[in-house]
Amino acid sequence: MPPDRRGERQAALRAALDGEGLDALLVTHLANIRYLTGFTGSAALLLVQPDTTTLITDFRYAAQAPDEAGEAAVVEVDRTSVWERLARVLGAAPAGTLGIESQALTVRDAERVAALSRGRVAPVAELVERLRAVKSPEEVDAVRAAAALAQAALAEVLPGVRVGQTEIEVGAALEAALRRRGSEWHPFPTIVASGPRSALPHARTSPRPIGPGEWLLLDFGAQVDGYCADLTRTIVVGARADERQRTIYELVQTAQRRALQHLRAGMPGREGDALAREVIAGRGFGEAFGHSLGHGLGLEVHEAPRLAPTADAPLPLHAVVTVEPGIYLQGWGGVRLEDDVYLGPDGAVLLSDGRTELLELV
Ligand code: ZN
Ligand code: ZN
């Protein structure tokens, strides 16, 4: 059995609440609720007070919530309204300053909380997310397992990819292989983009058939124990790569390798981003790399920290992030290579295989 981290996570959160001058925090973001209590359902409010943690949910989770939360929370099930139940729980405690998650709560629900709270309500941002950015060894292992699963699914599917198949057909084969191998779900819509459509960084997988000698970009993920992997590979189908394809590919590959080699915990996110961006911009393709270099990975596929030109925050030790440079040329196509790494004391450790040699399916 892996160690149960929920008690120490809640203790760390309470210390953060103290630091912010809060008496309690209403946690409404589901990934945060899962992190603190183990509850995986789709509807809950979590009230973290100095001495108690209360999980409020509805009838659908009457059995599941106590089972998953165990000792980590007192579970209150309300058949009519979780908000009325929250009012009652709050009413039993001294009025103080209640934090709400400004990045997660809708304006309507924030007004609801303000109406039922007897004390002050203070919006705070990303208190739990900051804790989640620092991974335990088990969390790192789960992302590694998800990456291994995703790679095995890709290796199974690629030999069957042919010119004339549609993006959706390739996506269906890949998603089936991911599920068959045990992925809990697809953490985001699978991207399979061929030819000029590979220049759309977030392309929607379409009925377009793959043409000979075209790029095929696959961005896909897997989920193990709730933890996500996120990988991108770009290959050539039906022919050898032409000279321009090879040049662009090698540039993205060089940029990614430089980032993987020099990325360190403690450096601001923008310095991490620059490791790859300088390589691409130095060859005149800066405008064609229009997104950030990477993002945190964990219970969510996009979480803290960020590797972006605007990210001043230092990358935490024990973070897990993606490294995904790309070059996108409208009308021609695009190349992106994405791997997942753990930021340990000695630098970035690959969790995915980092095998990015150019693959030509001929
Ligand atoms: Zn991705
Ligand atoms: Zn990504």
Image: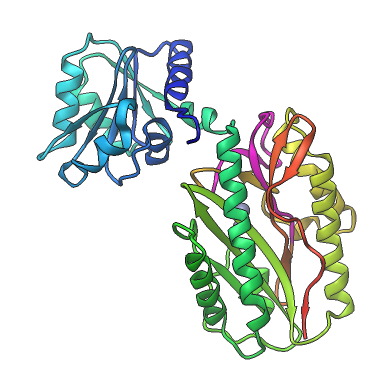
Q: Which residues are magenta?
A: 301-326
Left or right placement of residue 28 versus residue 316 in this view: left
* Residue that lies at the very extreme toward the left in this rendered image: 80
Display colour scheme: rainbow
Residue 295 lies in quadrant: top right
Where 355 sits versus 204, above or below?
A: above
Say which of 80 and 172 sits in front.
172
* Residue 106, percent from left and from top: 33, 39
Q: Is residue 135 left or right of residue 269?
A: left
Q: Which residue corresponds to the image point at 14% horizontal and 37% vertical from the top-left?
A: 81
Residue at coordinates 30% horizontally, 31% vertically from top-left?
70
Tell whether 167 sits left or right of 273: left
From the viewer's perspective, tell me whether residue 57 is left or right of residue 237. Answer: left
Numbered disc total: 0
Residue 178 versus residue 291 in the image, above or below: below
* Residue 108 visible in rendering: no
Find the residue positioned furthest to the bottom: 164
Figure check: 217 above or below 322: below
**Residue 218 can be seen, yes or no:** yes
Q: Position of residue 174 (x, y in %)?
A: 55, 72
Residue 325 falls within the magenta-colored stretch: yes
Task: Point out residue 4 in the picture as x, y percentages from the top left corner.
Answer: 45, 29
Please name whichever residue, 362 or 214, is drawn nearer the observer in this view of the structure.
362
Q: Quadrant of residue 137?
A: top right
Residue 128 rendering spot, x and y as whole percentages:
47, 29
Report if residue 216 lies within the magenta region. Answer: no
- Residue at 87%, 59% (x, y): give it: 284
Q: Where the C terminus falls, by quadrant? A: bottom right
Secondary structure that dominates the magenta span:
loop
Looking at the image, the residue that sits furthest to the front is: 1
